[in-house]
Every structure is written in C-alpha cells, then in structure tokens.
Amino acid sequence: MNETNRLIGALFEPVTIGGLTLSSRFVMGPMAVLAPRTDGRPSEQTREFLVARAKGGIGLIIVGGSVATGRAFEESPFQPVLRMDRDEYLPDLSRLAGAVHVHGTPLVAELMVGFGRMGKPTPARRNISASANDVFIPEDRFPRGMIVPGGKRTPTATEATRADILQLQDETVAAAVRVRKAGWDGVEVAAHMSYFSASFLSPRTNWRTDDYGGSMQNRARVLTDLVRSIRSAVGSGYPVGLRIIANEHLPDGQGPADYAAIAQLVQNAGIDYVALSDGCYETMNVGMSVQDGEIVSQGTASPFKRALSVPLLLPGFHDPLNAARAVAEGRADLIMLARPLLADPGYVNKLRTGRLVDIRACDRDNLCLRRLMMNMPVRCSVNPEMGRESRAGGLPPPKRWIAAPVEHAILAATGSQSLMKLASKLMARKRFTP
Ligand SMILES: Cc1cc2nc3c(=O)[nH]c(=O)nc-3n(C[C@H](O)[C@H](O)[C@H](O)COP(=O)(O)O)c2cc1C
Ligand code: SF4
C-alpha cells in the first residue's frame, strides 16, 4: 500500500458519535442552500439536494438553514428556512429523513436558537443578544469575492432578558424532541459566528453582570443549561453535538484556549461531538478559508483536541490528503465538507474508489455565499446541477426565466469593485443630505 492510499484509508475508518457509527470521517457541514418552501417545509429540491449528497457517500449530513425557535424563524436573514419550531412540521421532517435514510446516511439537525445581532429586526421586534452591541464587518474581512465598500454594521441589539433566554431554551429543547420523533439521527446546537448563543461566550460581546455574564462558567451557562435540558429530554444514546466558534481572531476577542475550556464545560453537560467554526462575522473571511487546513496549521484546533474527549469535527479541509493527514495525526476525528459538496456531491465516493483526480474542486470564490447573502437561490460556479437537483435536466419553472437574468445582472454589478464603490458613495451622499 502506498503512502497516499494509507493516508486516505484513515478517512474511512469507522467512528462513533453518541452511539451512531459513521461510514467515513467526512461530514457534510450545515448550509442554508436547501430551498425549502416559503412556509418552512422541505421542498422537492430540499430532498433531492440532500439525497444527491447521501448517494455521494458522505458519512453524516448536518442539515443547516434550519430554525429551532419562532424568533429564529421571524428574524432569519436568509429566507426561506427549514422550520423545526412547531409540531405541524414533524410529518414533513420525518419524510425528509426517510428519503435520506434510504441511502444509509444519517442526518443531524442544526438547532438555530436565534440569529442575535445578525437577525433582521422590525420596529416591533428588536434583535436580542447577550448585551447591547452590534457587529461591524470591515471591508477587508469579507470572504473572497464579496465587495462591500466601507464594510457593514448591524443595528445595535437589546440585551436579552432572563425570560427571553429561558423561552428560547424551552423552544430549542422542544425542537430537539421533535427532530428525534421525526426519526432524525441527532441534533447540533449552533453557538458559532455572531449568533445569539455565541454572543454569550466571549467577554468582548457579553457585558452582563447577572449569572449569564462574568466568569467563564457564567458565560457558558446559556449552553450548559440548554444542553442539560436537551439531554434530559431526548435521553442518553441520542447524539447531541455542539457547533462552537473556535477563535474570534480579533485583538480584543477570545482565543482558542478559552473557547476550548468553554467547549469542555458544555461537553460535561452532555454532548457527543464538537464541531468548530473559525472566526465570527467580524472576521468572516477566516471561516470561508482560502488556505486549506488553516485551523490546524495555525494551532487553533489543538487546545480543543487537548480539552475534549468527544470527537472533534474540523472545517476548512478541501484537499483530501490534508484532511487525511489531520485525521491520521490525531488532530481531527471528523472532517467537515461544506462548499466542496456543493461543487461535487460525489466527492467521498470518488475518493473511496480511488478516483481522487476526478473530484471537482471548489474554487473558493464564494458565488454560493454571495447569492445566499442576497437572498437568491444558491448556485455553484463549478457545478451547474447544484440547486437544480430536483429538475433532473428538465426546464426551469417559468418564474426562473425572468428571475435568473436579473440575478446575473445584479451579481455582475455587485462583483465589480468600481461599481460597488460608486454605489456606496451615492448612498452615503443620499444619507447625509439634509
Ligand atoms: C452557501 C453557504 C451556506 C451556509 N450556511 C450555513 C448554515 O446554515 N449554518 C452553518 O452553521 N454554517 C453555514 N455555512 C458555513 C459552512 O458550514 C462552513 O463552515 C463553511 O462553508 C466553511 O467550510 P468549507 O470550506 O468546507 O466550505 C454556510 C456556508 C455556505 C457556503
Ligand atoms: S460557488 Fe461553488 S465553487 Fe464557488 S465557492 Fe461556492 S461551492 Fe465553491
């Protein structure tokens, strides 16, 4: 066996999370690309998108673009989203799980508690977060391909009350129970980027003086209480994961050692795996990495590996050989593939059958993300079938004949440095004209 085959072999050694055995070390990362119906139920496209990835041999699918609470549904910056916040959605969620299970692939639901400062407020519903602050994304911190002259600042959130926290906790626990009843294989608590739960974890964003602020134990409480309640509601032997920010990458931000210590506290409350997400919205270029495997090469993942006894799931590896090295060297237990599975749903099976050279690589230029941020149906620049899986070569529905060329024109304009600079100057002039 040559060195490459030996390395790749490490990616197909079985691994168990909370009693669930996976056929490979590759996990599909959560992505809001599912095109559910506007009422929040899965569409035919949702099902066919997931089935294509299940057929492609992925070991586990984490379903993102989903909401666990009524607030998360109302304030979601991305629309439409998959709803898990009410019992009426249970039969549809159950059918969706059944369609994926046909291919032997387990699926886990990302439980989005709330979007915090990234939510879309209305005059009647302000954003809530750990403390009353905002998010500012500087121009040079947007992922490659995204041009936002002057950067972007979100509205200042209101400090969440204890009643807000407990209500979101109760709804999220109910969503976990619902997902379990619907036959899904696990749930993952979302505490990453600059979303509601993540805002409590860092002293930079949590200025509270009650028992949700101050010490590390207090800052982790929003998660330890939630995970304990989920665990007691779903019982032992049902996988519960955590997606947590790994490093804010800001001079006044929290680093990996403290985030790893928080992850350990949450682990002790009853989780079965930890998935990392590098950076927050203020440093969102880090999470949409350009360099392969930076989360390991920059030393971000190692404090987590030392602090945790449950499997560690790392993002940012598109090159299977780098991924294999990380697993073989014990730096990661599982590898998250997000954009690579938009580019090539068959990635894992190609690797399994020795067709490494046939894998269609993601260009990391983020057309997918730009479309998401503009609330357009997500597409991939190297895979024309992505987002159209349910059409099976058929014609687009009539409304797409008008929408598609308009989207192309907007994308071309927003992809131009000079046009975006001009637009921002015009908007600034308009804003400050008395
Ligand atoms: C189009 C798109 C949608 C995403 N939606 C979500 C989401 O709903 N939830 C989430 O936790 N992460 C989401 N992500 C982030 C991915 O899970 C992942 O962290 C990121 O893409 C980096 O991994 P990659 O290099 O494998 O793409 C999204 C990413 C993309 C490109
Ligand atoms: S559009 Fe496709 S190729 Fe480009 S970054 Fe997104 S997934 Fe990768």
Image (tube, rainbow, N blue to C red):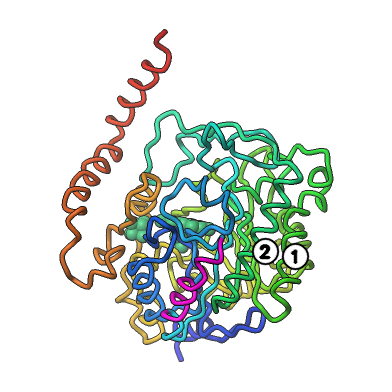
Q: Earlier in the sequence, mark 1 or mark 2?
A: 2
Tag 1 and tag 2, C-beta contact below 8 Å: yes
Q: Can you give x and y, in whole percent of width and height, for residue 139 in the image?
A: 45, 34
Q: Can you give x and y, in whole percent of width and height, for residue 176 in the image?
A: 63, 68
Task: Indicate the secondary structure of the residue bearing disc 2.
Answer: helix
> Mark 2 packing: few (<14 Cα in 10 Å), some, or many (20+)?
many
Amino acid beneath label 1? Ser
Say whether residue 417 is visible.
yes
Task: Indicate the secondary structure of the residue bearing disc 1.
Answer: helix
- The residue at 30%/38% (across/down) is 414
Q: Can you give x and y, in whole percent of width and height, for residue 372 in the image?
A: 38, 50
Ligand 2 occupies quarter = bottom left
Tell me which segment is drawn in magenta: 86-99
Report the Cα–Cα distance between label 1 and label 2: 7 Å
Q: Is mark 2 within 8 Å of ligand 1?
A: no
Q: Can you give x and y, in whole percent of width and height, for residue 170 in the image?
A: 69, 58
Residue 117: quarter of image: top right
Question: Which label belongs to residue 173?
Answer: 2
Residue that label 1 marks: 229
**Image position of 25 (left or right of 143):** right
Magenta residues, dominant SS class: helix
Q: Is residue 302 magenta?
A: no
- The residue at 53%/57% (across/down) is 67
Amino acid beneath label 2? Val
